[in-house]
Image (tube, rainbow, N blue to C red):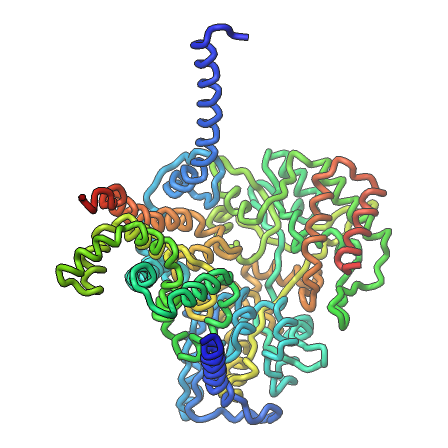
């Protein structure tokens, strides 16, 4: 009896495995290295775009179909958030979209899982996009694996122009002073590694990717300079403890909209732009992060900055059509349309000069900040929580002497490197 | 030390009530907060005061007729979940009760081994099988129809949860079955006409659990529906999306309102079913 049952279960399991293989096995692509893009006839493509961009993406796909009307292409556009695209692709490559948008911090994960098809014609893409965004889409083997879509996936300074003048907004001290005068708060999420890394980057530390074992690498930074920076921030946070508030970023639009207004300025990203604009109306101001006085010298605050990329699924049935579509979705006109319709900052060097970009305070702020940033690519997962802890110690701890800060910093680096 | 027994009792009781009241307040405060702030008006999306200053029904209006269905499509999510929960509820309730009946009343050779197999399979945590379930669904081509796939997932193994209802059926005297058999009833008729009407409490319990399970499930639903667009989402996935970084600053109050609405069907079902909960106990079923 028991033997029979075991046999039956084994057969059932085998059968289901075979069925599963039958579905996935024949999807192998035939050619990968063909440089000339020859769109397949009757190609069927699935595109993933985030919900806010879905209408525009559909419109662009229609334009693409019209351009290649002789090829009889069908394109299905589905909603999938960019922050989750990689997870979904890695869950099941066969069920995933042929062309999908994702944030650059997921690039490494997708690369190592061989989920991205190399770009057929990289020279053109490298030419037309900003150097940093191309770097973010380049794999460790030096080949280009994705099409840069935006250059704005980061945070910058947002402020109420009626409280803080543009001159004051140029320096951190000026902002805090203006906030104190108006009795309002300055909000940033110092307890989140994504934002608190500003404190060490401003001291000259940068990321140099991960090594073969996945350990985070840094440049050869000057430890004293980094501690100088940390000390300067800690002093400011304590001097202005009535003004400085560390809290999740969603509090920024809320605090600005509240009646009476609580928040006058903060460090937030493009994802909250609409909510903040709604709260402040004409007083909406956005700029790159301010400078901070370190040892009497004004230093530009350096942020972590990401990109949005469009990738082509490595197991796409119609690789040529998918490549051509990804190319089309990231060209100059498409990027300008995104800047106009969605407020997304382009990575295309020509699109960056477009009026829709230079006129928008949030896009210009994001683009200006991107020049003072460390790219969010190829980062170790161990980076975030030690960094968050370090950020918290700077404003929470009563003891913020140089020695303590230095010890905390060394501990942080050791934890990130997992030593 | 207070001498009088009465005075001492009053003091002790007062202390106990203060403590219980305090604990009760703590327990109920998140719910009060949720309901209260789902009616909050004003421009700020997150709460800035504990008690809202402005009150409005706008959040509910936005939830029921979403201004941008690409982002928030609560009515659709609600319908999806409702369909899935109703069908899984019907199928799994039937399955559970029938399996329990068979194990409780019938005697066949494989009964003991099957009971054991059921027990052992039930001990594996559901998380272990999720990836396998995903690939099975994919192999069957059901991923494109996530509703069907989810109904199958929720109700397929339901019969394994027979233990509690089998225990209940065991307490119903077999004399009733025997009497019915003498009157010419078949096993099937006994189940529907004798056992079921006397098992309303366990029926209600099974219906409630098998409805609430799919209604509130997040992890399995996320795995099956995750790759699909938001038009296939269930309420759990949809609401979770609204508290994500990109949405929180604009949709937080819709999230609160949605969470209140999610509780409505479960509460309604419970209130409706509760009447039967106290009735239909087997006491007095057999008279001497």
Would residue B152 be seen by someone viewing this image from the given angle?
yes
Q: Is residue A47 visible?
A: no
Quadrant of the frame with the N terminus of chain B: top right
Question: Residue A304 placed where, x, y %?
Answer: 68, 59
- Image point (35%, 53%), residue name: B167
Q: Which residue, as the protein is rendered here, is positioned at the far front?
A: B288
Viewer-proximal residue, A32 or B158? B158
Image: B34 above or below A211 = above
Q: In the image, what residue occupies the spot 55% across and 93% down?
A: A30
For image coordinates 71% across by 54% down, the residue present is A197
B78 or A46, nearer to the observer: B78
Count of picture labels: 0
Residue B240 percent across, percent down from the top left: 46, 56
In the image shown, does A313 or A310 lie closer to the viewer? A313
Residue B113's spot in the image, x, y percent? 43, 67
- Which residue lies most toward the left here? B183
Image quarter where the C terminus of chain B lies is top left
Coordinates of residue A345 in the picture (x, y in percent): 57, 65
Judge whether A134 appears above or below B51 on screen.
Answer: below
A363 or A70, which lies in front? A70
Left or right position of B38 against A143: left
- A330 vs B56, left or right, is right
Q: Is residue A351 left or right of residue A23?
A: right
Looking at the picture, does residue B17 appear above or below residue A384? above
In the image, taking residue B162 as reference, residue B4 lies left or right, namely: right
Residue at x 62%, y 51% (from the top left corner): A157
């Amino acid at each position: 009896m028991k033997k029979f049952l075991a046999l039956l279960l084994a057969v059932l399991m085998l059968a289901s495995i075979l069925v599963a293989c039958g579905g996935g096995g024949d999807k192998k692509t035939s050619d990968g290295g063909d440089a000339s893009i020859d769109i397949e006839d009757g190609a069927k493509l699935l595109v993933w775009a985030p919900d806010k961009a879905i209408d525009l993406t559909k419109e662009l796909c229609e334009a693409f179909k019209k351009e290649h009307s002789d090829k009889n292409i069908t394109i299905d556009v589905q909603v999938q958030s960019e922050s989750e695209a990689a997870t979904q692709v890695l869950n099941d490559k066969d069920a995933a979209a042929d062309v999908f948008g994702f944030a650059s911090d997921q690039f490494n994960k997708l690369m190592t899982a061989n989920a991205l098809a190399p770009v057929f014609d990289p020279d053109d893409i490298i030419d037309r996009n900003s150097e940093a965004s191309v770097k973010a889409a380049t794999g460790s083997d030096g080949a280009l694996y994705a099409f840069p879509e935006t250059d704005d996936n980061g945070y910058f300074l947002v402020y109420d122009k009626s409280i803080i003048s543009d001159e004051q907004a140029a320096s951190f001290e000026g902002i805090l002073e203006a906030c104190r005068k108006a009795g309002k708060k300055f909000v940033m999420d110092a307890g989140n590694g994504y934002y608190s890394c500003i404190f060490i980057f401003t001291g000259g530390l940068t990321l140099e990717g991960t090594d073969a074992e996945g350990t985070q690498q840094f440049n050869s930074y000057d430890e004293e300079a980094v501690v100088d920076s940390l000390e300067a921030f800690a002093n400011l946070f304590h001097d202005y403890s009535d003004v400085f508030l560390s809290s999740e970023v969603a509090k920024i639009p809320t605090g600005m909209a509240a009646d009476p207004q609580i928040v006058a300025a903060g460090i937030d990203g493009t994802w909250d732009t609409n909510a903040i604009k709604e709260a402040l109306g004409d007083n909406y101001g956005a700029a790159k992060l301010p400078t901070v006085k370190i040892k009497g010298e004004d230093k530009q605050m350096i942020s972590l900055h990401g990109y949005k990329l469009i990738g082509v699924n490595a197991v796409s049935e119609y690789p040529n059509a998918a490549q051509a579509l990804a190319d089309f979705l990231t060209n100059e006109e498409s990027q300008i349309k995104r800047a106009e319709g969605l407020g997304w900052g382009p990575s295309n060097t020509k699109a960056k000069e477009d009026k829709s970009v230079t006129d928008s305070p949030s896009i210009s702020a994001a683009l200006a900040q991107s020049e003072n940033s460390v790219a969010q690519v190829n980062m170790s997962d161990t980076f975030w929580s030690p960094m968050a802890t370090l950020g918290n110690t700077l404003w929470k701890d009563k003891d913020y002497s140089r020695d303590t800060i230095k010890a905390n910093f060394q501990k942080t680096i050791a934890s990130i490197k997992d030593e | 030390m207070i001498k009088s027994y009465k005075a001492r009792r009053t003091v002790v009781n007062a202390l106990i009530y203060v403590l219980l009241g305090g604990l009760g307040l703590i327990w109920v405060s998140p719910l009060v907060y949720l309901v209260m702030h789902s009616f909050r008006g004003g421009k700020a999306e997150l709460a800035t005061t504990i008690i809202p200053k402005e009150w409005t029904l706008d959040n509910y209006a936005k939830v029921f007729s979403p201004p941008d269905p690409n982002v928030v499509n609560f009515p659709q999510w609600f319908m999806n979940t409702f369909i899935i929960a109703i069908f899984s509820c019907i199928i799994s309730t039937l399955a559970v009760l029938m399996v329990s009946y068979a194990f409780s009343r019938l005697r066949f050779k494989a009964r003991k081994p099957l009971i054991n197999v059921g027990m052992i399979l039930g001990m594996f945590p559901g998380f272990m099988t999720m990836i396998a379930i995903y690939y099975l669904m994919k192999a069957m081509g059901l991923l494109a129809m996530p509703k069907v796939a989810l109904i199958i997932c929720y109700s397929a193994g339901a019969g394994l949860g027979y233990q509690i209802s089998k225990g209940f059926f065991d307490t119903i005297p077999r004399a009733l079955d025997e009497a019915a058999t003498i009157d010419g009833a078949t096993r099937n008729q006994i189940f529907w006409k004798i056992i079921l009407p006397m098992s309303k409490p366990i029926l209600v319990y099974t219906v409630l659990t098998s409805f609430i399970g799919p209604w509130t499930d997040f992890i399995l639903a996320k795995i099956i529906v995750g790759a699909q667009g938001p038009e296939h989402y269930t309420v759990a996935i949809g609401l979770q999306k609204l508290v994500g970084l990109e949405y929180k600053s604009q949709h937080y109050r819709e999230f609160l309102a949605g969470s209140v609405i999610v509780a409505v069907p479960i509460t309604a079902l419970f209130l409706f079913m509760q009447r039967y909960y106290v009735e239909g106990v087997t006491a007095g079923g057999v008279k001497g």
